[in-house]
Amino acid sequence: MVLSNPAYLVLGMLRVGARSGYEIKRLADSSARYFAALSQIQIYPVLKELENAGLVRGKSDPRGHRPRRLYTLTAAGERELVDWLGRDEELPLDVRDLGLLKLFFADALDTEGQLRLVREIRARSERILAELRRSEPRALARSERGYEAPQHSLGFGIAMHEAWIAHCDSLERYLATVSRRARRRAS
């Protein structure tokens, strides 16, 4: 069986402890959102698809007047997740980054404009890095419950944003040197 990436994300979130659509979304947003997108409108159709395929089991668990359904991974769902994880396939890296797109065309800006853009990219990575570091205790708690892989993914995110910050620092120093040279030539 070949499912969509969001379906595998839902299976994985159920495996690590999420039970409702709300919990799946909350856990995905606090852990995987920088490398796997899952919109609120995708969750319930995916859960229905997985339930129809026998990969998850749902049961009604209303809260007051609000309907709610709790899901568990079936043995078939666990096998499907494990099969997908072990599948020999290309692992494309799909980075869509408005900051990098702007940087690609930044020759249209003067040096000061380029510096502002690089500083914005660095500031964004600094914000994300701070957020990732705040999530380290949760990842550590999960690893103590036997789920170490999320902590490994978190390590990749931390290393990536540390590298982006370092590269932005280097690029900022370079652009500052270019700007100083240009001012000297102009005077």
Image: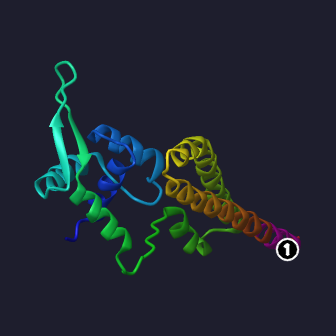
How many numbered marks appear?
1
Using a 10 Å C-alpha cutoff, classify the residue at mark 1 as few (fewer than 14 neighbours), some (14 to 19) or many (20 or more): few
Tell me: residue 64, above or below residue 158: above
Q: Amino acid at mark 1?
A: Arg
Asked which secondary structure carries label 1, the reply is: helix
Q: Residue furthest top?
A: 64
Give the residue drawn at x 34%, y 65%.
82
Q: Is residue 43 one of those drawn in magenta?
A: no
Residue 170 x, y percent position in the rendering: 76, 68
Left or right of residue 48: residue 83: right
Which of 167 and 20 lies nearest the eye of the viewer? 20
Give the residue drawn at x 35%, y 55%.
12
Q: Which residues are magenta?
A: 175-185
Residue 48 x, y percent position in the rendering: 15, 50
Residue 66 x, y percent position in the rendering: 18, 24
Quarter of the image with the C terminus is bottom right
Give the residue drawn at x 59%, y 71%.
106
Q: Is residue 177 one of those drawn in magenta?
A: yes
Tell me: residue 82, above or below residue 63: below
Q: How is the image coloured?
A: rainbow
For residue 20, which quarter of the picture? Answer: top left
Residue 96 x, y percent position in the rendering: 45, 66
Q: Residue furthest left?
A: 52
Mark yes or no: residue 105 visible.
Answer: no
Mark yes or no: residue 127 visible.
Answer: yes
Q: Which residue is mark 1?
A: 181
Which of 156 and 83 lies nearest the eye of the viewer? 83
Quarter of the image with the N terminus is bottom left
Give the residue drawn at x 53%, y 59%.
153
Tell me: residue 100, above or below residue 147: below
Q: Could you tell me what secondary structure mostly forms the magenta stretch? A: helix
